[in-house]
Image: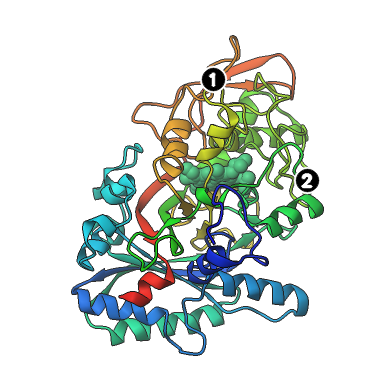
Amino acid sequence: MPFDRTQPISWENAVGDAAVMLDELQPNIVKAHTREFLTILFLKFNDPAGAKTFLKSLTQTPAAAPLLKSAKTHLQEVKAFKATGKKGTPYVGVGITSAGYALLQIPDPKVPPDLSFRTGMQNATLNDPAPAAWDPHLRGVIHAVVLVGDQMSGTRNKALTAVHHLIDAAHGVTILGKEKGHGLHNSNGDGIEHFGYVDGRSQPLFLTEEIDDERLTTDGTGNWDPAFGLDRVIVPDTAAPDPTRHFGSYFVFRKLEQNVKLFKKEEKALARRLHLKGDDAERAGAMLVGRFEDGTPLTAQFADGSHHPVPNDFDYDSDPNGAKCPFFAHIRKVNPRGSGGFEPVENERHHIMARRGQTYGVRTDQPNDGRIENKPSKDVGLLFMAFNADIAQQFEFAQSTWANNPGFPRVPPGAGAPGLDLVIGQSPTPRPDIHCPVAWGGSTISTTTATPQAVTMKGGEYFFMPSLAFLRSL
Ligand code: HEM
């Protein structure tokens, strides 16, 4: 029995093709897999036989509970944890690049068809630094990526050792390099990124169980509907035995280094330039991100404080002139919530993707003495990861047509040009001036120079995370 991919589904009531899909889908796609500690291995295969042996073994070893579990098993583990406290197993995920599919000798018509996937991130138009400046292990040909994560470093390490054994057992698998991520939290226990802001809160939700939770246990879903059809995150796995029931997802990986010292300096300088005093100085940083550090949306209130649970039920209807949250603020650029002005909201929603990022790097300012000059300027950042059904329409659209585009969103006359996304916007030319509300919601808008770019892309690639059925069939 086919299922309607334009709608969310209930995993607990899934039957027929929907149940097969969940049994054969990798975890972390339709629902984020929690992990505080994550290791990402970038692999190159020297021969197809060794590659096949390794990829297949992830779904078969150990026989009783293979390292690469299904989405269904993951969801069952989460349910058991909520009911009894029983901990789940580590997360293992695997993605293959277009070059990887070629090496595996998968016939071209069966290779995942997404054009961006096939051409690779190095050929994308994203205003990225030239690949020669990327980290060495991310700049050459990559065939596959393996993610290994868990809540504790010990259990992550155990799973990682098991993956290393499989790599050693299959011949011709080379580890090009690795990234290590670990979670950061604020004093409320919420996950944050290195600039200090709550991250990972706003997500498309594909399971009715998660949508119900959002409606009943948070600030609600009356203004922003987090429900998305499965067709925004999964696509038929064309190389699998039965693409009508076996699905996968396009996985975007980008290593984004954060110059925390520069960003914090600029937050302060912006507050000075706008004459924001006392507690209101916090608004300068919130204007760059669109939320205060504790996650309070700037469009909803003029100061932080509404952090539990971090709100997400808002839109920009009450702020058409950017008098509360400026148009250049990161979250307004990458999810205008119906206020972009170029497309109807249903089409705008097609560009939203499932973000699964994790912070990396060791802070040099621990214990945190609050001094900006002690904050790191390199070697820390975000391992940006996202699942997509269509890379050009989701990740690339958000980065290129929205974040990098100084003319987005469409703004009313007199509101001042929007400018680049001041967190992730990349441009070959200097960032245009920005327009900031002097008092929150007031009519006076001050024009000032944009903050410099504090995020540097250090490399990345597009992968396809295939179905377990495909991996078993190798
Ligand atoms: C170092 C780089 C980045 C930093 C520091 C960062 C930071 C943040 C923060 C603090 C939030 C607010 C938390 C939330 O609403 O979940 C957020 C949301 C978001 N970010 Fe980023 N981000 C980065 C890179 C990216 C990239 C590369 C993209 C995509 C091109 C992106 C897309 C989004 C989206 C779609 C949201 C949710 C917006 C919403 O629904 O309101 N971010 N980011």
Q: Residue at x 29, y 81 (%)?
A: 53
Residue that carries the numbered disc 2 in the rendered image = 220
Q: Residues within 10 Å of mark 2 (few under 14, many from 20)?
A: some
Count of numbered circles in the view = 2
Ligand 1 sits in quadrant: top right
Q: Is residue 50 above or below residue 461?
A: below
Is residue 132 positioned above or below 178 on the image? Answer: above
Q: Which residue, given by chain and number where applicable, does mark 1 sit on? A: 410
Q: Residues within 10 Å of mark 1 (few under 14, many from 20)?
A: some
Amino acid on which the number 2 mark rests in the picture? Gly
Quarter of the image where one finds residue 190: bottom right
Q: Position of residue 25 (x, y in %)?
A: 49, 66
Report helix, strand or loop for mark 1.
Answer: loop
Relative horizontal placement of residue 404, taking residue 154 as reference (left or right): left
309 w.r.t. 85: above or below: above
Amino acid type of the residue that numbered disc 1 sits on in the rendered structure: Arg
Q: Nearer the viewer, residue 60 or 275?
A: 60
From this viewpoint, is residue 260 visible? no
Marks 2 and 1, how far apart at CA: 28 Å
Nearest to the eye among marks 2 and 1: give it: 2
Q: Nearer the viewer, residue 467 or 94?
A: 467
